Amino acid sequence: MRILLIEDEQALARLVEMELLLQGFSVEIRYDGKTGLARALEGSFDIVLLDWMLPDIEGIQVCRALRTHSRVPIIMITARSGVSDEVRGLDAGADDYIVKPFDMEQLVARIRAVARRTEGTGDENVRLSQGGVVLYVDERAVYENGARVHLTNKEFEIFKLLFENRGKVISKESIRSTVWGRDFHFDDGAIAVHVKAIRDKLATVAIENVRGFGYMIPREGRADRD
């Protein structure tokens, strides 16, 4: 597995590199956002480990820029531990989020978990529609009445899961494990934040809140929103 580490703290970068090499990974290091982004775009990496606080470009900006051109899995590594920071990082396109200081075994476990989730998950050329809403799986795009609706990476994944399973109640646990992975832990409020954002962006699709369990998109018509 080839890993790109973008981290400006050289001592930490070297420590992470040594641990990953011992685990059998191939590692390259870049110490700033600009060169890290360039290397990520030109190289063929299996995972990018990305620090948030970089000296030139914030890691979250690097994440957004990389996500527009690549599907490479991204794990953000940061000292920012707030829930809002975590949500911002995930919305920017990160696949996982780990807070400093962290245990090396924890980092390796997260890397392996992300690799398992993303291995062999190429999108199929699928078009899903209901009413005026069309979802293109391969394009990762949603259109409502002909206009494209700009969803973040996680919003799209949640909406896709609910839209593919219209008429079925999807539990919060299923949403968490499908979109973030079973090894990722966070407050259920993060899912509610993303669902609210989807509701605000899509005027003709209802997402029902089944209290204490999960969410559902009815097959036809529009239900009341909680």
Image (cartoon, rainbow, N blue to C red):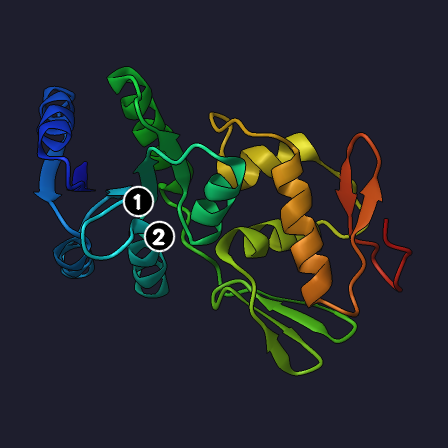
Residue 91 location in percent, x, y? 49, 51
Can you identify the residue that label 1 sits on? 52
Residue at 40% x, 46% y is 94
Q: Is residue 18 left or right of residue 46?
A: left
Residue found at x 65% / y 30%: 173
- In the image, taking residue 141 as reference, residue 195 lies left or right, namely right
Residue 23 in view (yes/no): yes
Identified by mark 2, the residue type is: Ile
Q: Are marks 2 and 1 in contact (CB under 8 Å)?
A: yes
| Secondary element at tag 2 | helix
On the picture, is 107 further left or further right than 148? left
Q: Earlier in the sequence, mark 2 or mark 1?
A: 1
Q: Is residue 25 above or below residue 158?
A: above
Q: What crowding class fits label 1: few (fewer than 14 Cα within 10 Å), some (14-19), or many (20 or more)?
A: many
As drawn, is 131 to the left or to the right of 7?
right
Q: Mark 2 = which residue?
A: 60
Determine the image quadrant of residue 42. bottom left
Say how many tags the image has: 2
Q: Amino acid at mark 1?
A: Trp
Query: In the rendered view, would you say 148 is above or below 126?
Result: below
Of the 4 image quadrants, the one containing the N terminus is top left
Q: Residues within 10 Å of mark 2 (few under 14, many from 20)?
A: many
